[in-house]
Amino acid sequence: MSQDQILCISYFDQVMGPSTLYSSELLSESLNTPNLDRILEFNDEEGTFIFAYRKYQTVNHLFYIDSDFARGGKELLMITYMVRAAIFKDEIVDVFKYLDSKEPILEEFASEIKHLKDIPSILHLKKSTFSEEFVMDLASEELKTNFMKIFNRYFERLVPKFQLDTPIKGKTRLKKVFIVGAPQVGKTTLLKNIELIQFLHVKRNDLPSRIYEVLVENIEILKYNDEFGEFICKEYENLEECTLLAQAFILVFNLSDQNSIYQTKKVFQIIHDKHLTLEKELVPILIVGNKFQDKEQFQPDFIHEIFEIEKFKELGVKIKYYALNILTEDENIMKTLRWMIKQII
Ligand SMILES: Nc1nc2c(ncn2[C@@H]2O[C@H](COP(=O)(O)OP(=O)(O)OP(=O)(O)O)[C@@H](O)[C@H]2O)c(=O)[nH]1
Ligand SMILES: [Mg+2]
């Protein structure tokens, strides 16, 4: 199985902390897989949730199994199925819908694991001389065989059948959300922060409810060069291409600088005109006023007026304005992104 999809079972070892019971791949820094340990360390509620992390998008199912060995009589385990977004050729939504649809399979998988007796005992083997890759390597042959049968069967069921032999389309086809705005308003900072905000950064009490987070791989900065009146994007040739691919726009400006508000509006106007000439349907628009010094100098009414938010709403465009400090307010960034993702889905 390629590294495009990984299935992993981890658990919370009461002595060692988060540990890997078994995984189809050794998770490592170089693979850019999410840090499952950190997820397990901070969560203990049963449930399924989706978590996007740079290269990989994951669906995770946390569950307990009864154990005579554990304090409290229960062991916490987590099944994680992850896919590289790049294997999905089409829309952002495909990955989310796809992962979301896997919940029942993960639940079934968990229930089969619950019924494998002897699992609790290997979770409590002394690991001091532990040199194997996975704790499962320490199990008896019988348990290993039974476990692998189940593991492989569910892995088969999880893997998308339709695309495996299809070559991945050009990377450029994936990028769908564009950040635009005046110079020096925090566009790069926003993108970097979205990449860095990890699951745990933002305290969550709503774990069992679905968490849709943005696909970082699908966000690009679309810069406007005022001098030459042209758009520059790392991945795309020109504005026309970006407009045709865009699934959403994020507009950013400096909320203490009127010029930057007007400049961002001007850039957006050019993009909007392009939409009209190409007769492309208008996509959701997220407007972010960056509160540089935590100042909110210009009130929402003013922003609404400049960006003609009400007019767009009447046209049926999904559009929303948020004021926040891009550098520091992770939680609010996630809130705005969740809004955007919901509009796309
Ligand atoms: N205090 C504060 N500084 C910020 C914030 N966001 C960005 N900055 C700083 O503002 C400067 C510009 O931010 P960038 O993210 O590079 O802005 P940009 O829009 O990518 O700029 P260009 O790519 O040059 O157009 C950097 O020094 C950031 O550290 C913020 O929310 N608060
Ligand atoms: Mg930049």
Image (tube, rainbow, N blue to C red):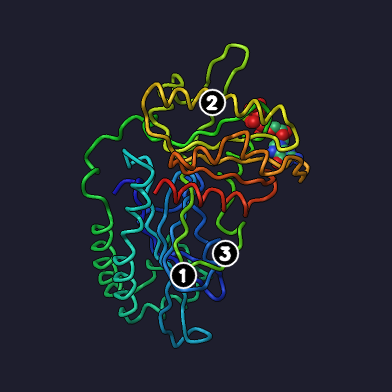
* Residue drawn at 34 percent across, 78 percent down: 114
Q: Position of residue 254 (x, y in %)?
A: 70, 35
Q: Position of residue 281 (x, y in %)?
A: 38, 33
Residues at marks 2 and 1, CA–CA distance in whole angstroms: 51 Å
The residue that label 2 is drawn on is 269
| SS under mark 1 | strand
Mark 1 vs mark 3: give the one in front.
3
Mark 2 neighbour density, 10 Å: few (under 14) some (14–19) many (20 or more)? few
Mark 3 neighbour density, 10 Å: few (under 14) some (14–19) many (20 or more)? few
Q: Please tell me the numbered disc located at residue 204.
A: 3
Q: Position of residue 223 (x, y in %)?
A: 56, 24
Mark found first going from the N terminus, 2 or 3: 3
Q: Position of residue 88 (x, y in %)?
A: 32, 42
Identified by mark 2, the residue type is: Gln
Classify 217 as above or below 145: above
Which quarter of the frame holds ligand 1? top right
Q: Please tell me the numbered disc located at residue 73.
A: none
| SS under mark 2 | helix
Task: Decide which of 57, 286 is in the foreground and name it.
Answer: 286
Identified by mark 3, the residue type is: Arg
Identified by mark 1, the residue type is: Tyr
| SS under mark 3 | loop
Displayed quadrant of residue 108: bottom left
* Residue drawn at 34 percent across, 53 percent down: 97
The residue that label 1 is drawn on is 11
Mark found first going from the N terminus, 1 or 3: 1
